[in-house]
Amino acid sequence: MAYTKIHAVTATVNKAVDYICNPSKTDEGILISSYGCSPETAAYDFKFALSKTRQSDPNKAYHLIQSFLPGEVSYKEAHQIGVELADKLLEGKYSYVVTTHIDKGHVHNHIIFCAADNINHAKYHDCKKSYYNIRSLSDDLCREHKLSIITPGEKRGKTYREWQAGKNGSAWKEQLKSDIDEAIKNAATYDDCIELIRAKGYEIKGADFGEKAHKFISFRPLDRERFVRGSAKSLGTEYTKERIRERIEEKALAKEKKRIPFPARKKPVVKDYSRKNLIDTTEDKFAESPGLKHWADIQNLKIAAASYSQAGSISELEKQIAAKSTLAKTARESLVETEHQLKDLGQVLKYAEQYKANRIYHIRYQKSKDKDRYLRQHETELLLHDGAKNMLKRFGINTKNLDVEKLRSDYNALYSKKQALQKTYKTAEKESADLNRKLDNLNQYLDRTPEQAAVDKKVEKNQNTL
């Protein structure tokens, strides 16, 4: 299980990077990785990328934290997952530093990445959609590494501590909100609602309105020492005293305006039975109810017939599955290879631009009469030049024949290839899953065991040979 959260860094990138790279937290620096920069020069690398963008928001970087359930994952595997998450999320466009902290009760990753990408010089857009993408990618990686995940809807609106408390059956805030909802549903007025909540065993203060009234309403179960505020931060926007009163008023208004609409003629729903799974009629409830068993048999007949009619035959269905599986496997292998190429080329392009932009400072430094003075004035530019030159040399790039535009063109072509492979892979995977479900339905309906399926396949192969 991994829990993720993200926030923007608007001030000192170097301090944020220094914190996550603390040797005492990262096994003496062993659990540190980076891309498109080094931990020591990340602030300079980020500053160069930010200087290329025209967007004016103050965000310099983003700090993403990925936490794991205590005892579920090793330090090394957690770090590997962190790097994989950064690669999948940032697609080789953004420079990043990944560290794994081992000083707390639970292992957790810190990912700091530049707010501006190195390819198109656009800024990362942090919003609900991008956060859900992070969570989805993190969950996918947890599944690949055989780790547990937070199921959809289970985490929303809770802190990490509350989510863990919920697992232990102690999330009393959820019970409080449920009791308030029930009171609102049954109350005719705000005062009635407060009395109903008190009747459920809660002590309430600050329920009144007026100049001298408390800003927040507060609730305390009789078995707890502390009150919890009915505020947006503590319980959510739906549980402030203003909103509780509004909800009761809205309910009353809706009741007054409620009219019985003229019944519209419903369109007949055409069910695609081939998309359903066969019903397991071996359960006790089917044996106890002949009518239910009869209904299930009819449904299973429809599902099997639909699966067979769309496939043509079982052998044809198996051929289609084999073809789609091969396509999905080939597309995935090509996709992984392309992603590695993109990551490498993204670094080359980033350092090529960095080298080209700061080359003039190196030339002027060589010609300068007072090199120490020039170094003090342009230390950042000279540092970026030397770092880019060393990295390009490591990649086997000749700086004398550096063509940034060609590198950019190659990157864009490779990125288009990646998108096409992603689409092919996802489509083939989905179609393969649909075909496998149809085959499972037919095998189950015909009581066709895997051994019988293998024999049928062998017989068919011999017939085709003859």
Image (cartoon, rainbow, N blue to C red):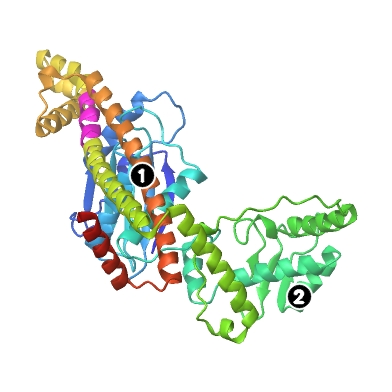
- Alpha-carbon span between mark 2 and mark 1: 48 Å
Amino acid type assigned to the residue bearing label 2 in the image: Arg
Evaluate whether residue 279 shows in this view.
yes
**Magenta stretch, residue numbers:** 344-354
| Residue 328 % position (x, y) | 31, 48
Evaluate whether residue 20 shows in this view.
no
- The residue identified by callout 1 is 89
Identify whether 256 is placed above or below 417.
below
Magenta segment's dominant SS is helix
Identify whether 169 is placed above or below 118.
below
**Residue 362 figure quarter:** top left
Camera-side residue of 39 and 277? 277
Which secondary structure, mark 1?
Answer: helix
Which mark is first along the chain, 1 or 2?
1
Instruction: Check if residue 346 falls in the magenta segment.
Output: yes
- Residue 206 is marked as none
